[in-house]
Amino acid sequence: MTFQEQLKADIALIEPALERSLSGESGAGYDRIFEAAKYSALAGGKRLRPVIVLAFCRLCGGDAGNALPFACALEMIHTYSLIHDDLPCMDNDDLRRGRPTSHKVFGEAMAVLAGDGLLTRAFETAAESRLPAETVLRCVRLLARAAGMNGMIGGQVLDMESEHQKIPLDKLRLLQSLKTGCLIRAACELGCTAAGSEDEHTLAKARAYGEALGLAFQIQDDILDIEGDTAMLGKSTGKDEKSEKSTFPSLLGLEECRALVQSLTKDAADAVSTLGDSAFLTELAYSLVGRAN
Amino acid sequence: MTFQEQLKADIALIEPALERSLSGESGAGYDRIFEAAKYSALAGGKRLRPVIVLAFCRLCGGDAGNALPFACALEMIHTYSLIHDDLPCMDNDDLRRGRPTSHKVFGEAMAVLAGDGLLTRAFETAAESRLPAETVLRCVRLLARAAGMNGMIGGQVLDMESEHQKIPLDKLRLLQSLKTGCLIRAACELGCTAAGSEDEHTLAKARAYGEALGLAFQIQDDILDIEGDTAMLGKSTGKDEKSEKSTFPSLLGLEECRALVQSLTKDAADAVSTLGDSAFLTELAYSLVGRAN
């Protein structure tokens, strides 16, 4: 299978599984919460995180289907974080994945609850995996730590508290490592763990891949916020400048950022090069360099 | 030990455990999220749900200490739901447990994130229990289902969508069974499950206790919203009338509500009367009748 064929096959596994996990029509008058959850979770998107989960599971010799509940859980957590980030009291964004944001369509209260619902359903979905209980629990802990106050939420707080000021590069790296890095590193570890791998060497390499890829991805995101096109991106551009956020380009300049994305992508590829058939993960990393959305 | 002594001993177990679960100072600039989480979680409150968890664990012959992570998780979920319910886009409340609400103190964005952080930390805390993995997973699933879109969140949606209109009694019962009932029933089941009990008869009785107690509790809450005193309650009163919510008193009248609270409390006590030493749970139920806060 070529990289593109495998990617397509993975997404064809992930999207119906996500939809199944979010089907729960009640017939009892609260169906709109499922509608709101699905509106955001099934709005397309690159599915980067769940694809990474499946890829690491295969790399470690596991059946990708076994990793699917964790892949879906991670994507639900990512989606909830976007809904809450877009709220008027946070980034106040109107556009996401080319569509009006959740609170624009469903109202603020329902958007808060849809985010809450996705986060809760993520843990339910993960905990319903049929893998051995020890493995499932390990995955639940990975998810909770990555998404929590010492992970993604901590990064979001740092981000909020860094608006309208210039922050040093090391603080920006910490912020991004928490805000976007944690979930991407968790994707790598979840794949390995779902495959039953507890080998510390493999997990360290997986984390290193996630660390480098996550940072490359974020720098590319910053570049696209300056150079990208709203229609291609499906979200507003120029946001960082407007909110006076420190970004990698604002601290390092565009040229150095482009070079950094290249070298981090190579770091990611190097990290997994000794772990068996890493061709897919290598191509995945390179496919994100120079992406337009 | 008398009922009051046991209650005090339980709360003396729960509160430090909650505080430990929410200590995570980063030194990295995002400490305020922990401050906000603790502000709401350690603001007093009756601790009804975690106390029920410990009591059912003891009733089933377990060591209450083993149930502590699940008791704390449930209280964190309850607390997050209060923070999000109080937001300006939801109930827009200024007062909770006698103190300004989270968004009044920390701002809306931080209140959203503190709620998210508590919900995530709840699952982390539960998943870190040292009990057998199968038992822990069962508890994680119980928590997620009770708190999720077919549980508490669904009830919150029904509640929102029922404002400014008169709804029939059966819809109000469903709403309350989801919004407050689910977590209270989960408290009962979590206690039994943490004790290792998988006996369906016991679980059914535990659920029946939670069902009756949860409804009695909610009706009493509605009564207090009319007759209670803001200073005693620590939260605003007269809210239901202001938002034109259907409540048990608005549909049934105060007299019938008082009688219902009595008979439901008896139902709760009856449900556990054959399950061993149920004195504590019986007294707990009766202590809620006629409470002033």
Image (cartoon, coloured by chain):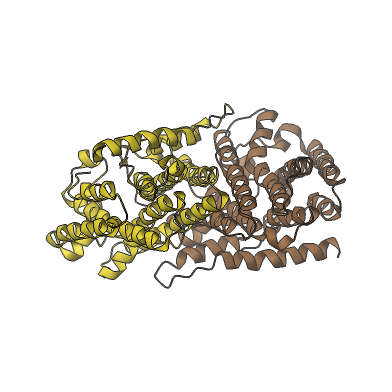
Chain colours: A brown, B yellow
Residue B243: tell me if it is visible: no
Q: Is residue B165 left or right of residue A154?
A: left
Question: Going by the image, does A97 lie left or right of B36?
Answer: right
Residue B244 image point, x, y percent: 25, 59
Left or right: B265 in relation to A7: left
Residue drawn at (63%, 59%) of the image: A69
Nearer the observer, B232 or A81: B232
Compare residues A236 and A134 and report the one nearer the observer: A134
Instruction: State the image quarter where residue A10 is shown.
Output: bottom right
Quadrant where the N terminus of chain A is found in the figure = bottom right
Spot occupied by residue B19 in the image (x, y as percentages of width and height): 44, 33
Residue at x 62% of width, y 37% of height: A245
Residue B159 point in image, percent of width and height: 34, 60
Q: Quadrant of the C terminus of chain A?
A: bottom right
| Residue in the picture at 60% in, 40% down | A151
Number of on-image labels: 0
Where is residue A259, by image quadrant?
A: top right
